Image (cartoon, rainbow, N blue to C red):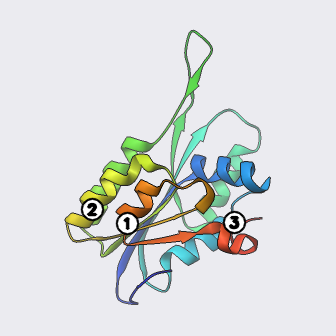
């Protein structure tokens, strides 16, 4: 990853929707969350691993949620909302950002597994507060603003065989 130390306490926050859609779009494959978590922790002391997921009433999603739990992630589940015009929306940006700020007070490092530029501001804040902030995402679709706001960025595309199923 970047500079990490075995004694660091680290929390890992995974934006499952962002990772899923990017992996499917770029590679037509899925994320290996076990490898993702191992790489994010990078030999440090894991305090929390949270995966932010959306329930869309797909038959295989409960199995996916259970697999995340078996790997070591807590799952935060939000139901998808359908509006009168038929459009749908569900995202975890605010919840994930609040968790990053809260967890930064109790950790030496926070790893955001996302390429979403909406997290750049919270990354700058966490960094300013003295907590190391890292991101893991696919280079091709990760925001330059996000990458410039973190202490270290891991490009999942650089070792896609490791991070994809």
Residue that numbered label 2 is attached to = 126
* Residue in front for this viewpoint, 43 or 137: 137
Q: Nearer the viewer, mark 3 or mark 2?
A: 2
- The label on residue 150 is 1
In the rendered image, residue 80, in percent from the top left (x then y), is placed at: 57, 30
In the rendered image, residue 157, in percent from the top left (x then y), is placed at: 67, 67
Residue located 59% across and 46% down the image: 17
**For marks 3 and 1 on the same chain, the one whose residue lies earlier in the sequence:** 3
**Image position of 164 (left or right of 90):** right
Residue 1 visible in the picture: yes
For label 1, the SS is loop
Query: CB under 8 Å between callouts 3 and 2?
Result: no
Residue located 40% across and 90% down the image: 6
* Residue in front for this viewpoint, 16 or 152: 152
Q: Give the spatial CA distance, label 3 vs label 1.
A: 23 Å
Residue that numbered label 3 is attached to = 32
In the rendered image, residue 35, in percent from the top left (x then y), is placed at: 64, 73
């Amino acid at each position: 990853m970047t500079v990490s130390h075995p004694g660091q306490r680290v929390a890992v926050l995974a934006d499952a929707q962002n990772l899923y859609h990017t992996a499917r779009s770029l590679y037509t494959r899925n994320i290996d969350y076990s490898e993702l978590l191992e790489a994010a922790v990078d030999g440090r002391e894991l305090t929390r691993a949270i995966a932010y997921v959306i329930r869309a009433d797909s038959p295989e999603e409960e199995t996916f949620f259970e697999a995340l739990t078996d790997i070591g992630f807590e799952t935060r589940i939000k139901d998808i909302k359908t509006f009168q015009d038929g459009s749908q929306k569900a995202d975890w940006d605010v919840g994930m950002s609040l968790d990053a700020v809260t967890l930064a007070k109790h950790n030496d490092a926070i790893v955001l597994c996302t390429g979403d530029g909406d997290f750049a501001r919270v990354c700058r804040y966490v960094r300013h507060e003295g907590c190391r902030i890292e991101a893991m995402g696919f280079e091709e679709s990760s925001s330059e603003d996000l990458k410039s706001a973190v202490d270290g960025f891991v490009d999942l595309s650089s070792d896609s065989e490791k991070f994809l199923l």
